[in-house]
Amino acid sequence: MGEIRIGMIGTGGIAHVHGRQLLELEEADIVAICDTSDPNREKFAGKFGLDDVEHYTDYQAMLAESELDAVVICSPHTLHFQQATDALNKGLHVLIEKPMTCSSAEAEQLIRTAKQAGKVMQVSYQRHFQPEFLYIRDAIASGQIGKLTSITASLYQEWKQFTTGLWRQVPALSGGGMLMDSGSHIIDVLLWTTGLTPAEVKPNLHLQGAPVEIDSFTSIRFEEGAVAGLNIVGFAPCWHETYVFCGEDGGIFYDNGKITVRRLRQEPVVPELPAQQTNQDKSFIDAILGRHEVMVPGDFALKVVKFTEMVYQAAGYKPY
């Protein structure tokens, strides 16, 4: 294949990251953009010099009229399922922003649709491409800290302050609060790096006066024996992301990008990490071109959806 013609569904916020990364690739070309907001589309097109790109306010019109090979979906969460379904049924490859869907039933159906269509469907969990998290995953898998005994995963973010009045706090569009949104990345890291299977969750949620949950603290018991604490705090003064993975032979500590490995009565070790080799957009294009398998497939993203669903159900919380 030559250039892969891409349509953007949603051009706000995170779409700008995808736009920059896609346009770094010789094989990718953004030919159509869709957003219900005229200013969003104009800002996106202007930023990337897309003077000749086709503009749409209705994604179905874009799918019907524009010559496309793939779409990148950056729309509100509850819209992902239908938009991805329609794109796949149109014969297009799909890259979906997180979360893949807002329910496990939708996620399972979407996976079936992608398989029936024979098209690439990837979910945009970017930490899968970052050297820090690849190191953590490989170190755990190779037994460097022994059998996992406990994990703590925490994200603090000024989410409530920055999303007030926006679609992320509208349950019918967001499907939930910070756990469904930024928290999805932390759940991804917790499940992907460890390979553990959640058996039981005991959550506490706090809406902080918002229409959706802002803070959540969840204790987790895994089938393999480890326990964990997941702390997603959306009413914080800044972004701070931390993980602690404790095993029978040591621990891995992650603090805002810095990794330290600790062992009993030994000096801490800071590993040297390689440069990042790819990202969510390059890997999507490479998978379409047959250069490698899909690196974040729907089957994995389903685990994140199921876990989020477990937490909400255990809390007796129905966002929408």
Image (tube, helix red, strand yellow):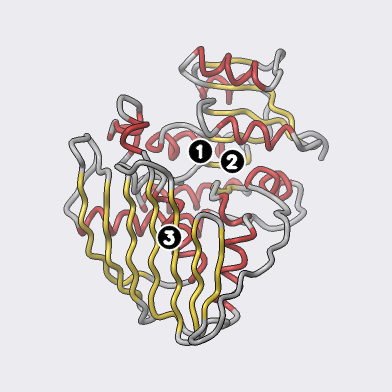
Secondary structure category for the residue under label 1: helix
Q: Amino acid at mark 1?
A: Ala
Disc 3 target residue: 303
Q: Position of residue 197 (x, y in %)?
A: 40, 71
Badge 1 local density, few (<14 within 10 Å), some, or many (20+)?
A: many
Which sits earlier in the primary sequence, circle 1 or circle 2? Answer: 1
Image quadrant assignment for residue 102: top left
Secondary structure category for the residue under label 2: strand
Secondary structure category for the residue under label 3: helix
Disc 2 target residue: 94
Q: Position of residue 267 (x, y in %)?
A: 56, 80
For residue 13, the mark is none
CB of mark 1 within 8 Å of CB of mark 2?
A: yes
Mark 1 or 3: the one toward you: 3
Which residue appears at 50% of the width and 12% of the height? 38
Q: Position of residue 79 (x, y in %)?
A: 41, 34
Q: Amino acid at mark 2?
A: Val
Q: In whole angstroms, how far apart are the C-alphas of marks 1 and 2?
A: 7 Å
Which residue appears at 21% of the width and 59% of the height? 314
Please, is residue 252 above or below residue 22 in the view?
below
Which residue appears at 67% of the width and 31% of the height? 6
Please, is residue 118 above or below residue 171 in the view?
below
Which sits earlier in the primary sequence, circle 1 or circle 3? Answer: 1
6 vs 198, nearest the viewer: 198
- On the rendered structure, is 223 left or right of 38? left
Q: Amino acid at mark 3?
A: Lys
Disc 1 target residue: 84
